[in-house]
Amino acid sequence: MASPIGYELKRAQDALSRAMGAALDELGLSVPQYATLWVLAEAPGLSSAELARRSFVTAQTMNEIICGLEGAGLVARRPHPGHGRIKQAHLTAAGRSRLGAARRRVAAIEARMVSGLNPAQQRQLSVWLGACRINLQPLELSRTTPRLTP
Amino acid sequence: MASPIGYELKRAQDALSRAMGAALDELGLSVPQYATLWVLAEAPGLSSAELARRSFVTAQTMNEIICGLEGAGLVARRPHPGHGRIKQAHLTAAGRSRLGAARRRVAAIEARMVSGLNPAQQRQLSVWLGACRINLQPLELSRTTPRLTP
DNA sequence: CCGATTTCAGTTAAACTGAGATAA
DNA sequence: CTTATCTCAGTTGAACTGAAATCG
């Protein structure tokens, strides 16, 4: 057990998180904000609650993230037509532009991170990481998808 | 860019961190405390400052971790003979026993995490993760090893 | 005086739980 | 009445910076 795989995983993610944080900070974005813009670009009109579910955080946490983005003018929210309580979020023009800049920076960092691996190896690494996550999920499956055990 | 590798990395580490946190919590340990016990078992007698360097945190953060471990009776510290200010930390009998129990739980979690991979693939994954970390380091190299640019 | 170690105090980022108001 | 959404308020864990005391 010279250097456990969990240790390598944590160190690698720490390094990525730091690099992304520094790059996004220059754009006035936090990592959670970037992640939320990313989800919202692919699924416009989601509610805060739905965004929270897809990002694996609580509704309160997502509310804080969304409020920050709204205050910065990157996201706008409108009441759902015919369902007054729900607020649908979507990117503003500024939000799309900022996300584009952030994407480019993050893509450059990720490219540097896997620069020693060829495309097939990069795919393999991604697949293995996905398998690791899934292997660990069962124990907390009831927390993230409570609907399966009603 | 369907599912970026950085996303997979973060999700996998999140899952591992949650699983470890839950398992260690039952033993009254936090993840940083476990990591410190681990380092200390392999290098007894280290000072807080040296432990901080090896764990990539500030001396203040390590002080908090060590004080927690000392208060729980898992670590004891004695003044360095002939160097009054330095306190050398080492595991107590209780600390060694607790670390053993924690190790077994963590090993079980890591084994489950990579359960779909054969030993060669596990080694490959570990190597790639190490490469990812190193590829990201140069930009913050001056922070973790300031001695290289005096 | 300088450098390293320890430690007190305050702060931050990012999550959390609790609780309340509202709408379907 | 129940359930889901949104949001205010407080808390937590784990990091950080600043600053002070001590030792060699």
Image: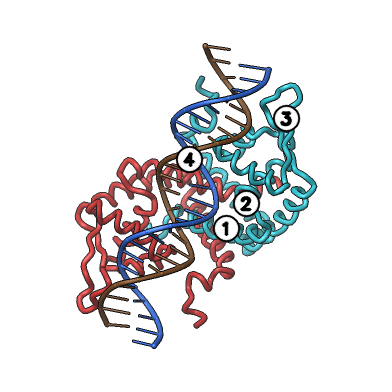
Chain colours: A red, B cyan, C brown, D blue
- x, y percentage for residue C9? 49, 38
Q: Are marks 2 and 4 on the same chain?
A: no
Q: Separation of disc 1 and disc 2 at Cα?
A: 11 Å
- Tags 3 and 1 touching, CB below 8 Å: no
Q: Secondary structure at mark 4?
A: helix
Of residues A62 and B123, the one nearer the viewer is A62
Q: Are marks 3 and 1 on the same chain?
A: yes
Q: Secondary structure at mark 2?
A: helix
The numbered disc on residue B79 is 3
Q: Quadrant of residue B41?
A: top right
At x 59%, y 39%, the residue is: B62
Task: Give the label, 1 or 2, closer to the camera.
Answer: 1
Q: Are marks 1 and 4 on the same chain?
A: yes
Q: Secondary structure at mark 1?
A: helix
The numbered disc on residue B135 is none
Mark 4: amino acid = Leu
Q: Is residue A97 visible?
A: yes
The numbered disc on residue A5 is 2
- x, y percentage for residue B30? 61, 52
At x 26%, y 64%, the residue is: A89
Q: Which residue is mark 1?
A: B16
Horizontal side, residue A67 vs residue B115: left or right: left
Mark 1: amino acid = Leu
Q: Is residue B117 visible?
A: no
Of residues D18 and A74, the one nearer the viewer is D18
Q: Residues within 10 Å of mark 4 (few under 14, many from 20)?
A: many
Q: Looking at the picture, does residue B75 appear above or below residue A138?
A: above
- x, y percentage for residue B45? 73, 34
Q: Looking at the picture, does residue B5 appear above or below residue B84?
A: below
Q: Separation of disc 2 and disc 4 at Cα?
A: 18 Å
Q: Which residue is mark 4?
A: B136
